[in-house]
Amino acid sequence: RQWSAQWVPQVREGSRWMREAVASLAAPFAALGALIDTHAGEEQNDFQILYQDYQAAGGNEALDALRRNPGGEALNAYLHALAASANPLGLLGAIYIIEGTGQRIVPSLLPLLKRQVDLPPTAFRFLEYHGANDEHHLARWLAAVELAIAVDPEVAGSILATARRTAQLYLMQFEHILETSA
């Protein structure tokens, strides 16, 4: 419940910073922008699924009352700042960390979580969806990287640096969840 309460506002922002990034892309990156916009469209309502999971886990705060923790605030500020910059191709690194977490960690974590917490199956719909679909999202990410590198071969360093920073901020977000749960 604590995780989903703090994660809902983060997920709610995902399609916003992606669309902001698309608006910051120059004409040579139009195909990349269209691909990212498609992805943002598919995920724009995922926060509602997560909020319903939060409620199924016993959460009773109103949607708009939920807040990101300091790690989530730092991650959100970082992603929006990058998205507002010209040609924010490094954000592909952030997308990799976010989607890769779902694809690589959730399938292993979800069965353990279900065994350890006494919650109804409806409390895990968001994690089940992302564990199953992030593989497809990572394939789309690879296509996006190929489009970006075709236009600007030097972008790989920026993607890697953004992935590293996003992973650090993701960890900070998880650490704050653990602190509030203890």
Image (cartoon, helix red, strand yellow):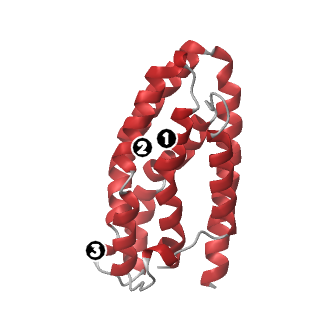
Residues under numbered marks 1 and 2 in contact, where contact means CB atoms less than 8 Å apart: yes
Cα separation between marks 3 and 1: 32 Å
Mark 2 residue element: helix
Residue, x 38% and y 77% (percent of image)? 115
- Contact between marks 3 and 1 (CB within 8 A): the answer is no
Residue at 60% x, 82% y: name it: 181
Q: Is residue 95 left or right of residue 132?
A: right
Q: Which residue is mark 2?
A: 40
Quadrant in the rendering for residue 157: top right
Residue 62 appears at what percent x and percent y? 43, 80
Q: Nearer the viewer, residue 131 or 39?
A: 39
Which residue: 68% across, 49% down?
78
Report the disc number at residue 19: 1
Mark 2: few/some/many CA within 10 Å (<14, 14-19, 20+): some
Query: Marks 2 and 3: which is nearer the front?
Result: 2
Residue 174 spot, x, y in % from top left: 62, 66
Badge 3 or badge 1: first in the primary sequence: 1
